[in-house]
Amino acid sequence: MEQIIKRPNGPSLEEINNTVKIPSTNHFLKNLWAFSGPGALVAVGYMDPGNWITSIGGGAQFGYLLLSVIAISSAIAMLLQYMSAKLGIVTQMDLAQATRAHTGRKTGFILWIITELAIMATDIAEVIGGAIALQLLFAIPLSLGVMITVFDVLLLLLLTRFGFRRIEALVACLITVIMAVFLYEVMLADPQIGPLLNGFIPKPEILHHDQLVMALGIIGATVMPHNLYLHSSIAQTRKYDRTDEASLAKTVRFAAWDSNIQLSVAFIVNCLLLILGSALFFGTSSDLGTFSALFNALQDPSIAGPAASPLLGILFAVALLASGQNSTITGTLTGQIVMEGFIHMKIPLWLRRLVTRLISVIPVMFCTLWYGGNETALDNLLIYSQVFLCVALPISMIPLVYFTGSAKIMGQRFKNRTWITCTGWICAVVLTVLNMQLVGSIVSDIMG
């Protein structure tokens, strides 16, 4: 299988590359179990604290209107993550390595900076979510909680000692806990099924300014650019024959199954978040724009109705803390991937994580101190960090669609089918246009 690009800097995530054994059998379930795991780490990014504030806030402000945005975003995510995993499996390069191989040194450096900013935007969501969860559960001041999150680097360093498979298992367990918590809370909220199902039908109101900002925040929190780099790397953790097309085809197939199953779980969680926000808070006059306000509202019968209870608030905070810590693992791995892939620079993992987290803490700590611990400022920072992710997404999408649609790079057998490539280009163009419309609307508001 002829390829025009060569791996520029050794295997991606060399310490875990080609380390997980797979069975030499055609039994579907045994293979699915062996290949399951990378999809869970990818799915974590689709249900981090950024998703919480955008999805719950979207439901509280606009009812079930933006369920269609979650559905479309999840479908796009499944398509892109399939392309990403396939790129890594077939070419044995992650997306950062492949992009760097087709660009010059200066372009690669610029793309690295943009991608690092996107990772930091994701980190901001984790820092804010973790700090607020600590405050809600243990009454720890926000400024101290922000600093505590710096040390979660120790969590990943500890987990890596037990092997990548155990990291995958831990992440999958935490995902299950998060889904169970919100499924329980939505059942108590007793949403209206008719309006709920109608929310999955796209409507023109989505393009109005306030709705568009929230919609793009949901897209940015759902289809995350750093996940494209991550998946293209961790899909290579399985021990498959890199030179045999049948082995490659099998690996691509089960990587797609793993990804789609886990992203379906993430889709359900995001829907539950928006449904919870709509069923309990849509139409209320209460200010529900912060995690603390949501925590308190879940316990207040005058706002949340008969479903309100202290247990709901505690479960909400526990799931928020778990979500932020869960996302820490993927942020660390992705930071290593893009640094090594784009600029061929390797530094110790603990230093990489510490530097990234410290830089991400700076704007959060500034807002915390400047606004005197006002959580509204932090939540606004979180929402706009998710909008930035949406703006950065086409920069990752365009090379991914190009690479996986090329027979010279992927081989004739593994290149995208025509309809997949066309759909990918349409998504990239539409997102770019929506981003331009959003920026234009914001500039117009400022000028006006």
Image: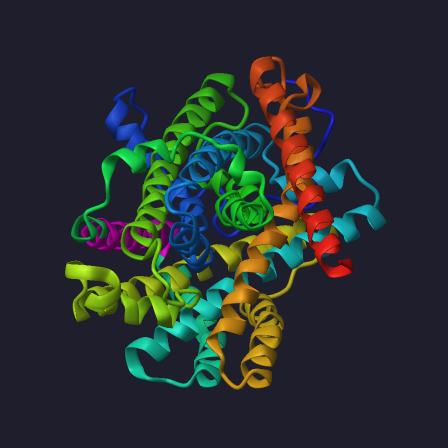
The structure residue drawn at horizontal position 43% and vertical position 48%, both measured from the top left corner, is 62
Q: Quadrant of residue 293?
A: bottom left
Which image quarter is the C terminus in?
A: bottom right
Is 256 displayed left or right of 365 in the figure? left
The image quarter in which residue 335 lies: bottom right
Colouring method of the image: rainbow
Foreground of the two, 196 or 179: 196
> Magenta: predominant secondary structure element?
helix
Q: Which residues are magenta?
A: 163-185
Residue 286 position, x and y percent, is 36, 66
In this view of the protein, can residue 34 be seen by the observer?
yes
Is 294 colored magenta in this rendering?
A: no
Residue 396 relative to residue 108: left or right: left
Which quadrant would residue 336 be assigned to in this image? bottom right
Estimate the x, y position of residue 69 in percent, counting from the top left: 47, 38
- Image quarter hosting the N terminus: top right
Q: Is residue 184 magenta?
A: yes
Q: Residue at x 45, y 45 (%)?
A: 42
Q: Name above or below for residue 390 compared with residue 319.
A: above
Q: Decide: is 113 above or below 200.
A: below
